[in-house]
Image: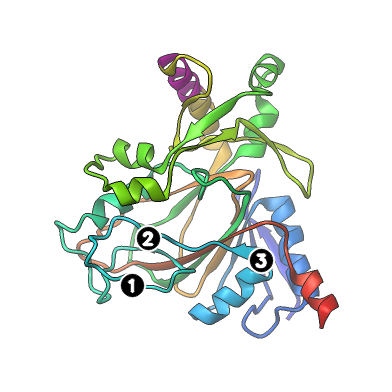
Amino acid sequence: MTTKITPLSPLFGARLEGVDLRADRSPATMALVERTLDQYAVIALPGQFLDDDEQLAVSELLGDLSRALNPGRAKTQATRLRAELYDISNLDENHGILAEEDRRRQWRESDKLWHTDRSFINAETSYSLLSARVVPPEGGDTGFADMRAVYDDLSDEIKQRIANLRAEHSVWYSRALCGGKDFRDDELAAMPPVSQPLVRVHPRTGRKSIVLASHASHIVGWPRAEGRNFLDELNAMALQPKYRFYYKWSAGDLVIWDNRCTMHRGSHFDDKAYKRDMRRTTVQGPSKYATNAAAE
């Protein structure tokens, strides 16, 4: 089957068909995946039906795997998935729907805020790969925003103003926005705040993006209220409909996005009636598919 690329919106996002990452993870195939990401920032590969080992094998070719802390659990609760998999679901450790009083429900609510994965970690997070194992009959779509196009459309005055600014990012700030509270000391210590530049240059394409997210609380070095207001203004620009699209999932889909130039969010579904089992891997650093091929 020949490959086919179909845009998902006027600005960014594409469906890549004719690729089977279970059977073919050759350097040529992975280079096609990354070139498509360079152009579209978000790509959907339908019908992959990856298991955990296959998802990890694909992910490791695109960078160094990060490990999920999967916070929100009580100390006595086990993780549902292995450490390299981020649990983007409404399921407990026994694969049942989370109880209403389970504190992990509050943690999942913040996934509905616009954010960039791991912007609260001091690392160059590159790609996220989200695999759909079980999807609800309606709802649960994922929204994406193109932060390259947002930057391009900023006035020269704002571009100059933000060129050297940094914002503080904290996962606890975004969780508090959704009503989270009573964070444990061990949770807070595991993920302290970090600062990130407000403008990022993509290492592969050279394109500039504006770096926002619900994790960003204020501008470093500014009065807190003034910095918060400025971030709110930038977010309002970034989240205009022309910069966004929503992806409707089917079981077996794999969607890969570049965190260096996008934001994303989950959308509502009836999470007390239906299961949604999504498993995310996230990588950092340069891709490895060419290096691995040379070493073989």
Kindly identify the residue that appears in the image at 43 percent across and 18 percent down. 224
Say which residue label 3 marks. Answer: 16
Q: CA distance from mark 2 to mark 3?
A: 30 Å
Say which residue label 1 marks. Answer: 80
Residue type for callout 3: Leu
Count all numbered tags in the image, as a single digit. Answer: 3
Residue type for callout 1: Arg
Quadrant into which the N terminus falls = bottom right
Specify the label residue 283 is tagged with: none
Residue segment shown in magenta: 225-233
Question: Disc 1 vs disc 3: which is toward the camera?
Answer: 1
- The answer to whether residue 132 is left or right of residue 156 is left
N-terminal label among 2 and 3: 3
N-terminal label among 1 and 2: 2
Is residue 75 at least partly visible in the picture?
Answer: yes
Say which residue label 2 marks. Answer: 70
Q: CA distance from mark 1 to mark 2?
A: 9 Å
- The answer to whether residue 52 is left or right of residue 43 is left
Q: Residue furthest bottom?
A: 23
Is residue 266 at least partly visible in the picture?
Answer: no
Compared to residue 212, the image places residue 103 above or below, namely below
Q: Position of residue 7 (x, y in %)?
A: 66, 55
Kindly identify the residue that appears in the image at 28 percent across and 40 percent down. 178
Kindly identify the residue that appears in the image at 66 percent across and 66 percent down. 16
Magenta span includes 39: no
Kindly identify the residue that appears in the image at 70 percent across and 78 percent down. 25
The residue closer to the viewer here, 9 or 109, is 109
Q: Position of residue 122 (x, y in %)?
A: 56, 45
